[in-house]
Image: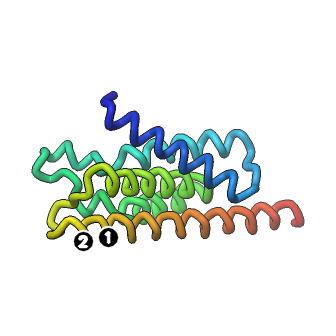
Amino acid sequence: MTVDRIIHLAVGVVFFILFLRLAKTSYELKLLILGGITMAVGTWMPDWDLWLGIGYHRSPLTHSALPALLFGLLVFKIKRSPILVVGFCLGLASHLFWDIIAYGNVHWIKGGNNDRLFLFVNALLLIIAAVMMHYKYLISSSFQRSG
Ligand SMILES: [Zn+2]
């Protein structure tokens, strides 16, 4: 595990804890662990473009909301657990957020500020998606309680 990987994971943990604090909702422990795992995957996933070579690194395909969309579609096909998507979105958002601060460069996008704006908008979309998924969880779990 590289230092970069550890930093991304640590920022993801901070995002996840802050989110849960602000959301003021307690998930079951099992769900929290699952969400923590998908959060960790979310912090790591954007750098999978390194497997294609350094020339592809920080590609807008992996450093955007796109992986979360694919992950969300996959998860909802298999298992309707919003927390899995919440965790992934927050992990991915934290990665993009940290890339704004630490690097700022996105492959194919010209101009440092355009890169940062791209990362920022995508991180924001991911946080909005996490909030929406979280409320979806609240609604579905209150339905389970009442029905
Ligand atoms: Zn990155």
Counting from the top left corner in percent of width and height, residue 138 is at 74, 64
The amino acid beneath tag 1 is: Leu
Quarter containing the N terminus: top left
The amino acid on which the numbered mark 2 sits, given as a three-letter code, is Asn
Mark 2, Cα crowd under 10 Å, few <14 / some 14-19 / many 20+, is some
Which quarter of the figure is the C terminus placed in? bottom right
Q: Dot 1, crowdedness within 10 Å: few (<14), some or many (≥20)?
A: few
Q: Nearer the viewer, residue 3 or 139?
A: 3
Residue 2: which quarter of the image? top left
Residue at horizontal 62 percent and vertical 46 percent from the top: 17
Q: Do the residues bearing badges 1 and 2 touch, measured as CB atoms within 8 Å?
A: yes
Which dot marks residue 114? 2
Foreground: 6 or 52?
Answer: 6
Question: SS of the residue at dot 1?
Answer: helix
- Quick check: 77 above or below 88? below
Q: What residue did someone put label 1 on? A: 117
